[in-house]
C-alpha cells in the first residue's frame, strides 16, 4: 500500500503531519530514508520504520484459474464473478484483478488488495509479459509470426506493440499457439488473430510476468507464495 496512507492509518496523522514525517527524515524503508510519499510498500517485502516504529501492512495476493463463463468483476446481475468463486473470508472489498479476462477466456487472474501494484503491472511501459494459449479456426503461418514480431495492426488502425507467436500445431482449419504480449488492450488476442484472418475459438492465459498458472485447477485459487511475492518486488515503485 502507499506509504503515506499507511502512516496516516497507523499514526492517525493529517496529510500535513505525514508530510512532516517525510521531511524530517523519519521514514525509512529497508534502512533508506524515503521522500517518495506514494511509494508502494508491503511489510512482507520491506522493513518499514517510521519515527522509530516498525509498521505492518495487511495486503492480500491471490492467483485464480478463472473458468470460462465467469466474469472478471466483483458483481454482475447475470453471470458468476471471480468473487463468487472465493471463500467468504477472502472476499476483501479492495480486491481487484491485474488485467481482465473476457467471459469466454479462461486462465490466470492475479487478484490483490494492493491497487498500486495492479496499476504498476498494467502500465504498458513496464512491458510485463502475458502468455496466452490460443486455438484458432485456420492455419497459423510464418507470415503471421512475422506480423506479430513487427506489430499487428487491428482493423480499426490501432497499432500493437511487438509480440511473439509460437506455433504448436497448424492445419488449414485448426491451429494452436502461444502468444506473448506486453500490453493489455481490450480483446487484444482476439483482435490480433482477426487481423491475421483467424477467429479465436479458445483462449487461456498462462502467465503474467513471473506469475504462472501451473497446475492450479479450473475454478480454484490460492494465496501467492513468499517467493512469488518477492519476484514482484521490482514492481513496488
Ligand atoms: N485477449 C483477449 O482477446 N481476451 C482476453 O480475455 C484476454 C486477452
Image (spheres, rainbow, N blue to C red):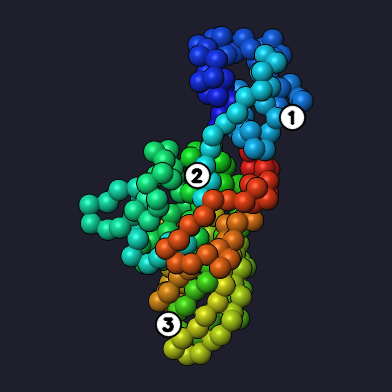
Q: CA distance from mark 2 to mark 3?
A: 35 Å
Point 22% across, 52% down: residue: 77
Residue 189: mark in rendering: none
Give yes or no for contact between labels 2 and 3 (Cβ–Cβ under 8 Å).
no
Q: Are marks 1 and 2 in contact (CB under 8 Å)?
A: no
Residue placed under numbered mark 2 in the picture: 112
Of the image marks 3 and 1, the number of the one nearer the N terminus: 1
Q: Secondary structure at mark 3?
A: loop
Query: Which residue is painted at 56% across and 68% down in the image?
Result: 215
Q: Earlier in the sequence, mark 2 or mark 3?
A: 2
Dot placed on the residue nearer the N-terminal end, 1 or 2 = 1
Task: Indicate the quadrant where residue 190 lies.
Answer: bottom left
Disc 2 within 8 angstroms of ligand 1 (CB)? no
**Residue 34 position within the rendered picture, expressed as x and y whole percent measured from the top left:** 70, 22
Image quadrant holding the N terminus, namely top right
Residue at 38% from the left image edge and 56% from the top image edge: 85
Tag 2 secondary structure: strand
Name the residue rendered at 58%, 51% in the picture. 224
Instruction: State the image coordinates of residue 9 (x, y, percent, origin top left).
Output: 51, 20
Residue lying farthest to the right in this orientation: 31
Question: Eyeballing the image, is 177 above or below 222?
Answer: below
Residue 197: percent from the left, percent from the top? 44, 77
Label 3 sits on residue: 137
Q: Residue 68: x percent and y percent?
A: 37, 67
Which image quarter is the C terminus in?
Answer: top right
User: What residue did someone put label 1 on?
Assistant: 30
Amino acid at each position: 500500500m502507499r506509504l503515506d496512507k499507511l502512516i496516516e492509518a497507523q499514526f492517525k496523522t493529517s496529510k500535513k503531519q505525514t508530510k512532516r514525517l517525510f521531511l524530517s527524515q523519519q521514514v525509512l524503508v529497508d534502512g533508506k530514508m524515503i521522500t517518495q510519499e506514494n511509494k508502494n510498500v508491503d511489510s512482507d517485502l520491506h522493513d518499514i520504520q517510521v519515527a522509530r516504529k516498525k509498521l505492518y501492512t495487511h495486503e492480500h495476493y491471490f492467483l485464480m484459474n478463472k473458468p470460462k463463463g465467469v466474469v472478471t468483476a466483483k458483481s454482475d446481475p447475470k453471470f458468476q464473478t471471480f468473487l463468487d468463486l472465493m471463500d467468504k473470508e477472502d472476499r476483501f472489498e479492495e480486491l481487484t484483478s491485474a488485467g481482465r479476462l473476457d467471459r469466454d477466456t479462461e486462465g490466470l487472474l492475479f487478484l490483490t488488495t494492493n491497487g498500486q501494484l495492479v496499476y504498476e503491472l498494467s502500465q504498458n511501459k513496464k512491458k510485463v509479459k502475458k502468455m496466452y494459449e490460443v486455438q484458432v479456426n485456420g492455419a497459423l503461418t510464418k507470415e503471421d509470426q512475422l506480423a506479430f514480431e513487427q506489430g499487428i495492426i487491428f482493423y480499426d488502425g490501432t497499432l500493437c506493440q511487438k509480440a511473439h507467436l509460437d506455433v504448436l500445431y497448424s492445419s488449414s482449419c485448426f491451429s494452436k499457439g502461444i502468444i506473448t504480449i506486453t500490453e493489455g488492450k481490450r480483446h487484444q488476442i482476439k483482435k490480433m488473430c482477426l487481423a491475421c484472418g483467424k477467429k479465436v475459438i479458445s483462449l487461456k492465459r498462462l502467465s503474467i510476468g513471473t506469475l504462472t498458472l501451473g497446475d492450479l485447477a479450473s475454478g480454484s485459487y490460492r494465496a501467492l507464495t513468499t517467493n512469488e511475492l518477492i519476484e514482484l518486488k521490482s514492481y513496488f515503485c
